Amino acid sequence: MEIKPFSAVQRRALCWWVPGGPDAGRDAVICDGAVRSGKTLCLGVSFVMWASARFDGRSFALCGKTIRSLRRNLVSTLLPVLTGAGFSCAYKVGENLLEIGFGGARNRFYLFGGRDAGSPALIQGITLAGVFFDEAALMPREFVEQALARCSVEGSKFWFNCNPEGPGHWFYREWILGAERKNALYLHFTMEDNPSLGPEILRRYRRLYTGTFYDRFVLGKWTAAEGLVYPFMAGKMFCPVPEGGFSRFAVSCDYGTANPCSMGLWGRRGGAWYRVAESYYDPRRSGSPRTDEEHYAELERLCGGRKIECVAADPSAASFIETIRRHGKYRVRRADNRVLDGIRRTAAALKEGRARVCDTCPDAMREFSLYRWDEGRNRDAPVKENDHAMDDIRYFVTTVLRPEGGFFAAAAPRGREGAFC
């Protein structure tokens, strides 16, 4: 890893708790802002340094939306930095436990996932000296508040890291707008605050996002989702079917009986997947719904004898998935149906040209011009209309085209005690 000096805001996040400093009397720190701004790593290092300087033999919590995402986003980058700086680290995977020592102190850091309404029960009963929330805005309020309630040790503090969501989000209203009332230090990060990001990577991220996602992930603003979901998909974004054939094929499917059923045939050529053909059956137009066998016959017609690597199917379509499996001709997978994350990844794939929609798909083209955010809701969600081809395209991106090919850069100095501040 190339070593770069920390920026001013990163240094403040690293050292806010140091005795005698201007922020030492705060009870919490909140870092939000752009993606890839270096806030996660420097805040994680700061959390461990503070715990090691203030406590010995105590328990702390590292919280993420899931333990898997926490390992990927924080632990995998944090441990090499800590060991390089002289900390001893033992990771007990089966117990979701990090034991970290420095000097004469040794403390326990438990990993927790806060993804749904049942998560608060996971953290009940433990006594904590501090808690770190990675992507706090993605966790249920009940989980965050339960974790905070476990911090009953004298001198305990709270650490929050997140990317922006909508301005109606509970975390924004309660903690960011109320930072002074909570006696919390609020630090806003931009991409320029990460010295490890060079000019070309910065330009790439600015090109990658648009609309709401640009405002949130690049500018770091808590903005409301409004307007078209994919505003950049004007007519020029659709292309003719490329000549010369394809090396691989896949199908994506949004299943419907009373609602439309949309299927897309995808072919890979070079570094891109093209949606070259579609089937869009609306029972309200035809006057009669299709059976699962009739949907399967249409799937076979769309595939046209091609070797299909995978059918990414609507995960709620249990009967249709079973029908495909029973015929034994195509490999079928339940698609990843996380809507907001899927929309973000689909927008990135379309903007980068890794997924392209051909002008032979008129229903997909029509839906792109109509698919909008539901501005009447308190949380981000698209209007549940004109979304069937949009859903099948999202299923393809999240299930077949999963690798995003993004960049991650973070910097940390190597050294012993005092190296960070």
Image (cartoon, rainbow, N blue to C red):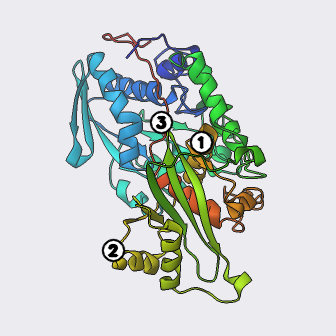
Front-most of residues 149 and 266 = 266
Contact (CB < 8 A) between labels 3 and 2?
A: no
Residue 402 in the figure: left or right of residue 283: left
According to the picture, the residue beneath numbered tag 2 turns out to be 328
Please report whichever mark, 1 or 3, sits nearer to the chain's N-terminal start.
1
Query: Residue 404, position in %: x, y?
Result: 49, 40
Identity of the amino acid at label 1?
Ala
What residue do we see at 60% from left, 40% from top?
Answer: 353
At label 3, the amino acid type is: Gly
What label does residue 348 carry, if any? 1
Q: Position of residue 229 (x, y in %)?
A: 71, 52
The residue most toward the front is 244
Quadrant of the image occupied by residue 421: top left
Disc 1 and disc 3: Cα gap in Å? 10 Å
Query: Of the residues shown, which amino acid type is indicated by label 2?
Result: Gly
- In the picture, residue 331 is in which quadrant? bottom left
